[in-house]
Amino acid sequence: MGISYLLTYCLNEENGCKEEVDLVRVARERNGIEILVDYYNFLHNIRQKFAESLCENSGNEYLRLCGAEYATFDKYVCNILKNLNFANIRLRFYIDGAKGSCKEQKRRKLDTWIKRDQKDVDKLNRVLNVSCGYDHIYNLRKDDGFRPVLIELQMIESIKSCGCDIVQIPIGEADHVIAIDFVEREKAFAVLSSDSDFCIFKNCKFIPDKLFDMENDLHLDQIINPFSTQSLPKLVCGMVTNERVVHSLGFSSSNDLIEMSILAGNDFTAPTLLANGLASQINCRSIEEYADVIRRYRKVENLRDFAYAMSHDHSFTKAVEYSRDFYLLRIEKLPASSKGYFTKLIEERIIEQKYPPHLMAMHFNFYWRRLILEDTHPGQPCAEIALETLRSCIYHMILPQNIQTVTEYGRTPDRKVDSYQVKAINDGTIPRINNINPSKIFVNLRTFHYIMTHQEPGSIETIWTDKYGRKNGFKYLMLRYFLLLNWKKNLWVSEAEFLGLTALVYGGHTKESEYQRIPICPSPRCFTLVNWLECIYRTMYMFIGKLLFISHEFPSAKELFSGSVWTVFYVCSDQRAWHQEIRKNYGQLLHQAKREMNAIIKEKRHIIKHIAEGCFYFDDRW
C-alpha cells in the first residue's frame, strides 16, 4: 500500500521525482532489461484498460458488467508481452501470498480487508442497479467494473504462454522480495508498481501505473495491435527514483525517507498511529510537513510523543524497528516451520508453482471468500457459501490432524462481510497432501472424481474422465455439480437455463468476438448463473486440481467461458428476456445465435442426457 500521499507527491511535475525513459532504447543499449512486476497491480491496471478498449472497439458498454471475455483478454495480454519480449524487455511477475498467510500481516490488516470488501459490496450493488435498469450504464464509474471470477487464472495462463517468469510468495506480500531482487538481479532495471514503498528502498526505481506507456506506444487502447510484434519502436515511461525523492524532500540520505515513512504511517506503523492518537498529535497534513519534521528531528524517537509511545507500547517499538529493517533489506525470510512438515511442503509447492498461494492461508486456518458478481437481493444465496462442502474436502487435505476448522470471511445473504468457521470433512478416502503422489495421475483422477460426485445420491461406477476423456470429463463433472447444487434449491435453475450453460461450455465460447457487438444488458439472473458455474470451476481447477497435480489435464478459462456469449445464450434460453430483446435491431443476430446454441445442444445430446439424469428428462433424440 505504501505511504498516504507520497505517490501523489512523486507524480507532481513540480517536485522533480521522476524522469522519462524509453525502455526500448535502454534495452537496446544494455542488451536486454528486466522489469519486476507487482502482479496484482499489473492485473488491475491492464484489466481496466482492456475493458475500456473492448467497450470502445465493440460499441458495447455492457461488456463492463460481466467482463469475462477470457479469450479476447488472453490475446490482449499476450500481444503486450510478446511485443515487450521482442524488444528484449522481460517482465518478471511477483504474486503476493494470500490474505491470512502471514499472522502478523493478518493482525495489522484484517480491519482494512473488511472495509475494502464492504466497499466492493457497495460497488457490486451499483452494478446491480444498472443491471436491473435502475441506473444507466454511463453513470457507472470506470472503477466499478467488477473483477471476473477467473481473471487471475487466465492472466497467469497468458503470462506463462509468453514465457515470462512468475514468482509466487508463500507468506506475506511480495514487496520485500521484489526489492531484494532489484538489487541482486543483474538485468533488473525498474519495478512496475504503484506502491510508494518502492521509492523508499535505497537506489530503487519504479514505474507507477500512470507513468507506464505515457505515449501509448503499446496501443493499449486497441484490442488488436496495429503493428508487427517485432517492431515496437519505443516505449516511453515515467520512472520515480529513490535518489530524486530524497533530493526533492531535502533529505541527506534514504534513511531520512525511512524515518518519514514511520512518522507518516507505513504498513507497519499506521495501525498504531491511528489507534493511539499519535497521528492527530503530529498534525501534519502533507508530505512536505512530514519531511520538515524529519529534517528537524532526524529520528522519530527524538519527538517527545513518539518517544513516550515507544516506551509504553512494545508492539509499536517493534513496528518502528521492523520498518527500518524492512526498508534496509535486513529482514530474514519469514519462517514457515511453525506447523511442521505440512507447512514446509505447502511452502515448497507454492514456490515451485504447483500450488496457489491461497492454500497456505487455508493451512493457517484462514480463507477469504471470493466476492463475485451475483444477485444480492434479500433471500438470494451466495456461491461461496454453497461451495462450503467442497472446501471442507480441501481443508481435510491440507490441515494438520489436530486442527480441523478454518475461519472464513466474506459476504453473506445478510451482511456485507461476516466470519464463521468451517470444519474439515472427516473422510479417509480423501488423501492428505503428504500421501498424494504427483506421478499417479490415474489414482489422483479417481480421487478428484470421488470428491466431485459427493452430491450424488448413490455410488457412481462410471469414471467420467475415463469415459469422455479428461477435458470432457472435467466439463461433465463441473456441469453435473452445478446442476445438483441448484436443481430445486439454491438458484432453482431451469432446464432451459442449464442447457444454455451447457452450450456455452461445449463450444459456444468460440463465438466470443461475434457476440461482443450485441449490446444486451445482462440481468442479475444472467450473470449469477454463469458466475456460480465459474466459482465451481475455480474450486475444481485452482484448489482440488492443483492439490492432486491434475489441473494441466483440464481446459483453461478461455476454453469454456465468455461473458458476451453467455449473455446472448441466456436471452435465447429465457422466454421473457427473448421477447424483450428480439424486437431490437439485432433480432436477426439473436435468431442466428439461437440456431447455433441449439446445434451445440443437439451435438452433445448424449452426454447431456447423462448430466441431467435424476434432475430432468432430456430426450437425446432431440
Image: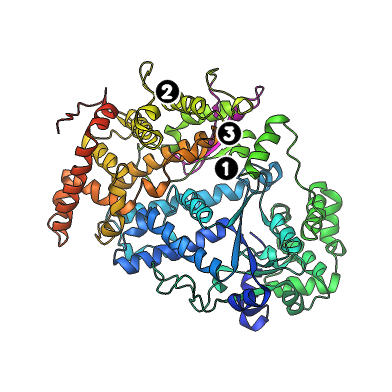
Q: Quadrant of the C terminus?
A: top left
Q: Is residue 567 left or right of residue 531?
A: left
Residue 505 disc label: none
How are the colours assigned in the image? Answer: rainbow
Total numbered labels placed on residues in the image: 3
Q: Please say whether residue 400 is one of the residues in the magenta stretch.
A: yes
Q: Position of residue 68 (x, y in %)?
A: 38, 52
Task: Please name the residue that numbered disc 1 is placed on.
Answer: 356
Q: Secondary structure at mark 2?
A: loop
Task: Please name the residue that numbered disc 2 is placed on.
Answer: 454
Question: Which stretch appears magenta?
Answer: 398-425
Location of residue 496 with respect to 164 vertically, above or below = above
Few, some or many C-alpha atoms within 10 Å of disc 1 (few <14, some 14-19, many ≥20)?
many
Q: Amino acid at mark 3?
A: Thr
Q: Secondary structure at mark 1?
A: loop
Query: What's the distance in space between the residues labelled 3 and 2, CA to CA?
Result: 23 Å
